[in-house]
Image (tube, helix red, strand yellow):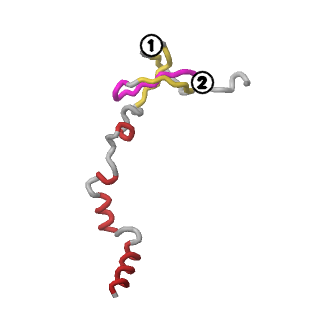
């Protein structure tokens, strides 16, 4: 490998600011602060707004499309379901 052209790839401590969850992984991210892991190691610290411990998708608190207060049904009532005209035409022919 050539010297001086590769980023500084090292272990970095990531901390979720919403709940204090910490994890260590290797990264090239630039950091200005240092943090201490649970086992006492001093590592570069990168602060996150959300992580897998606090994101609604991973914690199971994200609302499903079906639980959005009938927004999907309201849309279909207003604009019609895709392919509904073809189904209506088939139903009319079947009744004749």
Cβ atoms under marks 2 and 1 closer than 8 Å: no
Query: Where residue 46 appears, x then y in whole percent?
Result: 46, 25
In the rendered structure, the answer to whether residue 67 lies left or right of residue 83 reads left
Asked whether residue 10 is drawn in magenta, I would say: yes
Residue at 30% x, 62% y: name it.
73
Q: Nearer the viewer, residue 27 or 5?
A: 27
- Mark 2 secondary-structure assignment: loop
Would you say 7 lies left or right of 82 here?
right
Left or right relative to 73: residue 49: right
How far across and how far down the image is residue 26, in percent?
55, 25
Q: Nearer the viewer, residue 2 or 32?
A: 2
Q: Residue furthest top?
A: 40
Residue, x 48% and y 23% (percent of image)? Answer: 24
Left or right of 76 on screen, residue 48: right
Residue placed at 43% from the left, 26% from the top? Answer: 47
- Which of the numbered marks, if any, corresponds to residue 2? none
Q: Is residue 43 above or below residue 18?
A: above
Q: Which residue is mark 1?
A: 39
Name the residue that disc number 2 marks: 9
Give percent across and percent down for residue 27.
55, 26
Residue range (magenta): 8-20
Return the disc, 2 or 1, that comes first in the chain's sequence.
2
- Dividing the picture into quadrants, the one containing residue 40 is top left
The kind of secondary structure element at disc 1 is loop
């Amino acid at each position: 490998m050539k010297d001086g052209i590769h980023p500084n790839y090292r272990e970095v401590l990531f901390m979720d600011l919403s709940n204090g969850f910490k994890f260590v992984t290797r990264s090239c991210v630039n950091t200005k602060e240092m943090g201490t892991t649970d086992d006492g190691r001093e590592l570069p610290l990168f602060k996150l707004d959300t992580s897998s411990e606090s994101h609604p998708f991973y914690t199971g608190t994200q609302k499903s499309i079906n639980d959005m207060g009938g927004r999907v049904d309201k849309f279909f009532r207003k604009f019609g379901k895709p392919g509904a005209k073809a189904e209506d035409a088939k139903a009319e022919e079947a009744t004749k």
